[in-house]
Image (cartoon, helix red, strand yellow):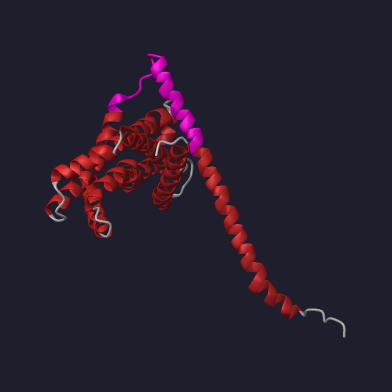
């Protein structure tokens, strides 16, 4: 018996159940891939442009950095984030101490809580806590502010007056984010370790002198420095992503909806970029034996 030709009805069913879903998924993956490439490329060239203005301000005296704008952004980005960073990092320190004590008791090494928390906070948790808080607190705010300026054509007005938007809007925000992120990471380190010290002494019955000595014996200067370096890079990423999402609304009529999308995209993209950057840093430090 010869094979039967598929009927038009069978072709319709196959197209509905197989071909169309595959085409939809493929189209979605392709669109997402090219959107990511576009965002990465735009952010990279924005970084190059901002770096050019920073270098020119250092080399050429007539090009001013805009120190007042940087200080203003530092207050907005960094100072107003202090309380929430302290709150989150102290809670993380308490959680780590409580979670680590029972398994370490099985080996009779409850005192090692200090060793583990010291390294974990300085290398990873301090920078990550500060970065995630800064993303939600300041990154979204910067994207919304610049996006609103783009939609209301204020950025076009700056260009009409021969004022470069990158110099006056992006550079102060990126520099402020970098400085604030490094400072917030140090603050998160201190707060988390202090909170874990307090609960270890008061609840877990670890002597204060033992906790401090174990921390000093375990933690090295390289742990602190690598954490601060990562935090500074996280700050640059947050500032760049926020500014790029806001500036990409220039010349559009997206309105409030576009500003909302830019704000949401900033938070999502910043968190993903921070985690990927942290992974890259960790791999590099492991390869060169800094871990």
**Residue 105 on image: x %, y %:** 24, 58
Name the side, left or right, on which 216 lies relative to 284.
left
Question: What is the quadrant of the N terminus in the image?
Answer: bottom right
Which residue is located at x 84 percent, y 81 percent?
3
Residue 102 seen in the figure: yes
- What span is colored magenta in the figure? 43-69
Position of residue 190 measured from the top left corner of the image (x, y, whole percent): 22, 40
Please determine whether, in this image, residue 161 is positioned above or below residue 207.
above
User: Which residue is at the far left?
Assistant: 202
Which residue is at the far right? 1
Task: Let me know if residue 152 appears in the view.
Answer: no
Q: Looking at the image, how many numbered discs can be counted on the residues? A: 0
Task: Return the x and y of residue 285 as percentages of the image width and height.
Answer: 43, 37
The front one of 125 and 275 is: 125
Please state, as top left, top right, bottom left or bottom right, where the C terminus lies in the image.
Answer: top left
Q: Which residue occupies the extreme front position in the image? A: 108
Q: Is residue 158 above or below residue 93?
A: above
Decide which of 268, 183 is in the foreground and name it.
183
| SS majority, magenta | helix
Q: Is residue 68 above or below residue 27?
A: above
Magenta span includes 67: yes
Q: Residue at x 27, y 43 (%)?
A: 118
Q: Quadrant of residue 66?
A: top left
> x and y percent of residue 10 in the render?
72, 79
Residue that sits furthest to the bottom in the current view: 1
Q: Quadrant of residue 15?
A: bottom right
- The answer to whether residue 90 is left or right of residue 148 is left
Q: Is residue 55 magenta?
A: yes
């Amino acid at each position: 018996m010869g094979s039967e030709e598929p009927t038009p009805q069978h072709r319709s069913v196959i197209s509905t159940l197989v071909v169309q879903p595959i085409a939809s998924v493929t189209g979605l993956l392709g669109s997402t891939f090219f959107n990511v490439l576009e965002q990465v490329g735009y952010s990279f060239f924005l970084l190059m442009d901002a770096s050019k203005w920073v270098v020119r301000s250092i080399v050429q005296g007539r090009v001013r950095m805009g120190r007042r704008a940087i200080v203003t952004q530092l207050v907005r980005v960094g100072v107003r984030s202090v309380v929430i960073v302290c709150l989150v990092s102290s809670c993380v320190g308490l959680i780590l101490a409580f979670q680590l004590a029972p398994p370490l008791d099985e080996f009779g090494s409850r005192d090692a809580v200090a060793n583990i928390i010291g390294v974990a906070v300085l290398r990873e948790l301090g920078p990550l806590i500060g970065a995630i808080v800064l993303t939600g607190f300041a990154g979204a705010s910067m994207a919304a502010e610049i996006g609103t300026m783009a939609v209301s054509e204020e950025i076009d007005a700056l260009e009409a007056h021969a004022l470069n938007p990158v110099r006056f809007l992006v550079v102060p925000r990126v520099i402020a984010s970098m400085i604030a992120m490094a400072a917030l990471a140090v603050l998160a380190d201190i707060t988390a370790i202090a909170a874990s010290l307090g609960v270890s002494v008061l609840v877990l019955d670890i002597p204060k002198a033992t906790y401090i000595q174990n921390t000093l014996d375990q933690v090295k200067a390289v742990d602190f420095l690598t954490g601060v370096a990562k935090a500074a890079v996280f700050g640059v990423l947050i500032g760049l992503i926020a500014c790029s999402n806001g500036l990409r609304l220039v010349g559009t009529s997206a309105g409030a909806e576009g500003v909302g999308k830019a704000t949401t995209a900033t938070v999502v993209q910043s968190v993903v970029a921070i985690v990927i950057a942290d992974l890259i840093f960790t791999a590099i430090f492991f390869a060169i034996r800094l871990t």
